[in-house]
Image (cartoon, rainbow, N blue to C red):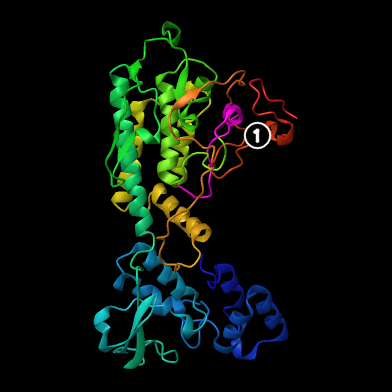
Amino acid sequence: MNKIKLSDDVIEQIKDFKYWELTEEQESLIDKLITDKELQEHYKNYGLCDVCKQLKIDYCCNYCIFQPNFKNWTSGNHNVDEFIQKAQLNAKSAIQIIEWIEYDKFEDVEYLAKGGFGTTFKAVWKDGPWETTFCNQREGETKVVLKCLHNSQDITADFLKELGQKLRSLEHIAYGLECIHNKGLIHHDFHCGNILSNFDEFAYVTDLGLCQPANVKSSQNSNKKIYGVLPYVAPEVLRGKEYTQKSDIYGFGIIAYEFCTGFPPYHDIAHDEFLAMKVCHGLRPKCDYKIPQLVVDVINQCWDANPLKRPNADELPKLFYNLFYEIYSNRVDSVIYKQVEEADEINKKSFSTVQSSLSFTSTLSYTTHPQAVYTSRLLDFKNLPEPKNADKNNDLLGVLYSDSLIMDFTELDINSKGMPTVG
Ligand SMILES: [Zn+2]
């Protein structure tokens, strides 16, 4: 974690060297143990700290100046604090030192200019930076420029808040589904178009037009036809099997994916018989937008090819509530919190182009395939294969096509009603 921290083993080997008069043998050992050229120079100029035996930068030791002070300041944001602490311990020169300084440490603040990304001021920093020759004191009054960045107060706060709201919405949707299932009913047409949400916590399940008792077998219905929005329809249903409460859970899994990633399922491909076949082969929606693994795990369970492996509706609200609660109450040590931080990092790299590294506010954009249909319609597919999970379908970002799906698309006649030929 700390790049410049020497291990006890290294310290043990070099602690008795006189850095100002190294023998040739000692020097080559130093070059071997301290591989960073800049740090080698530091050692040869300043040696090790008398107190903690770590490398010094200039005449000072990062560990002795900064570490004891960690408890004396906070930015109010755990991520920012950790970032600054790491930077302090890793600084290889005075210029690399980052500090958190309260606003009241500045005086004579005067407006200078306003730019596209921030506003600048000049000011006097009363204490000034650390004096690097006398490590226990500061340089005193120093003129500085202050820059106020727009939208940079929180690092992951936006992402955290957004994900928290999404999880809360999913909890409500799952609760709505639980109520329907508890009454012995099946929703039968569970897709995002039937969810009313203000995307600020509350969400409601609507459109119960196709809702029917779970004990009514489709064979008892005169109308055996399947209506729905293809991406949300479970593979067993596409194949003409019974629509069960577990088929609603599959739809919920797709909805959860869509809520969390912001991408409609299979928005970039045609919603045709060929897609239906791939879904039976284990294809599930995927995109590059990273969401925390714990959420991915729940979604993966919901859209398992085997209906019996999908959770019951009454298990879901609690799962989402627990994840929401850990984020909401800032449990920085929780697994979900760490995964959120990690996902945020990845998303910033993948989706940021011009924004500053401190904010993630851009909106994801995508184009929808002309044959991607998100309204209910008759789904009539023949001879679909037995549903199975894809071999490597463990992650939304993982490889979702199983080997059996590597085929020559040009050999497929996707307009024919028959089973497409796998090349
Ligand atoms: Zn020290």
* Rendering quadrant holding ligand 1: bottom left
Which residue is depicted at the point 51% across and 15% down? 241
Determine crowd level at label 1: few under 14, some 14-19, many 20+ residues with C-alpha closer than 10 A. Answer: some
Q: Residue furthest top?
A: 220
The local secondary structure at tag 1 comes to loop
Q: Using residue 168 as the reference point, say whether residue 17 is left or right of it.
A: right
Q: Using residue 173 as the reference point, say whether residue 275 is left or right of it.
A: right
In the rendered image, the vertical position of residue 347 relative to residue 219, given as above or below: below
Residue 385 x/y as whole percent: 62, 21
User: Identity of the amino acid at label 1?
Assistant: Ser
Front in this rendered view, residue 368 or 146: 368
Mark 1 lies on residue: 402
The answer to whether mark 1 is within 8 Å of ligand 1 is no
In the rendered image, the vertical position of residue 20 relative to residue 103, given as above or below: below
Q: What is the quadrant of residue 186 in the picture?
A: top left
**96 part of magenta stretch:** no
Quadrant including the C terminus? top right
Residue 25 x/y as whole percent: 72, 81
**276 part of magenta stretch:** yes
Which residue is depicted at the point 43% across and 32% down? 375
In the rendered image, the vertical position of residue 327 relative to residue 21, given as above or below: above
Q: What's drawn in magenta, residue-wise? A: 271-291
Residue 91 x/y as whole percent: 49, 78
Front in this rendered view, residue 85 or 413: 413
